[in-house]
Amino acid sequence: MFQRIFSILIISFFLFAGISMSLAEGEKGNARKGKYTYRKTCRTCHTQGGSAKDLSPVDKTQAQWDEIFKNIDKLKCGDEWKKISAEDQTDIYAHLWGHAFDSPSPEKCQ
């Protein structure tokens, strides 16, 4: 009887731990889709000769991208950003963060 209760407790613990870890990771976004969405929506302004500063993922570190996305509404393009769906915003973030200057795979071509 003790072994059965102990086994159930152990299984429950690992099940709970696994679920908790997957929820803690949060949304990661789709970097591939984010690259397309970034080019379609952001690069129209953030390019040489555009109305905003030329900007690509390697222009910032991952920590800088984190800070920018925490305060995105304070940027000049905050109103434009609000027009983009939450899913697309997450995807753009995944692309920019994943190819930042200090990432394992920084973007080489712009």
Image: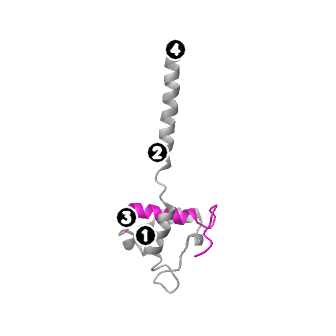
SS at circle 3: loop
Instruction: Specify the segment rendered in magenta.
Output: 84-110
SS at circle 1: helix
Circle 2 sits on which residue? 23
Q: Nearer the viewer, mark 3 or mark 1?
A: 3
Circle 4 sits on which residue? 2
User: Label 3 amino acid?
Assistant: Ser
Asked if the magenta segment contains residue 7, the reply would be: no
User: Label 2 amino acid?
Assistant: Leu
Q: Relative to residue 45, is residue 102 drawn left or right?
A: right
SS at circle 4: helix
Return the x and y of residue 88 as percentages of the image width and height: 42, 64
Who is closer to the viewer here, 95 or 55? 95
Mark nearer the N terminus (3 vs 1):
1
Circle 3 sits on which residue? 85
Query: Could you say which disc has been placed on residue 74 in the image?
Result: 1
Return the x and y of residue 45 as percentages of the image width and height: 45, 80
Mark 3–mark 4 distance (CA, rounded to whole Å): 53 Å
Mark nearer the N terminus (1 vs 4):
4
Mark nearer the N terminus (2 vs 3):
2
User: Label 4 amino acid?
Assistant: Phe
SS at circle 2: helix
Residue shown at 47% from the left, 81% from the top? 52
Q: Relative to residue 27, is residue 62 drawn left or right?
A: right
Mark nearer the N terminus (3 vs 4):
4
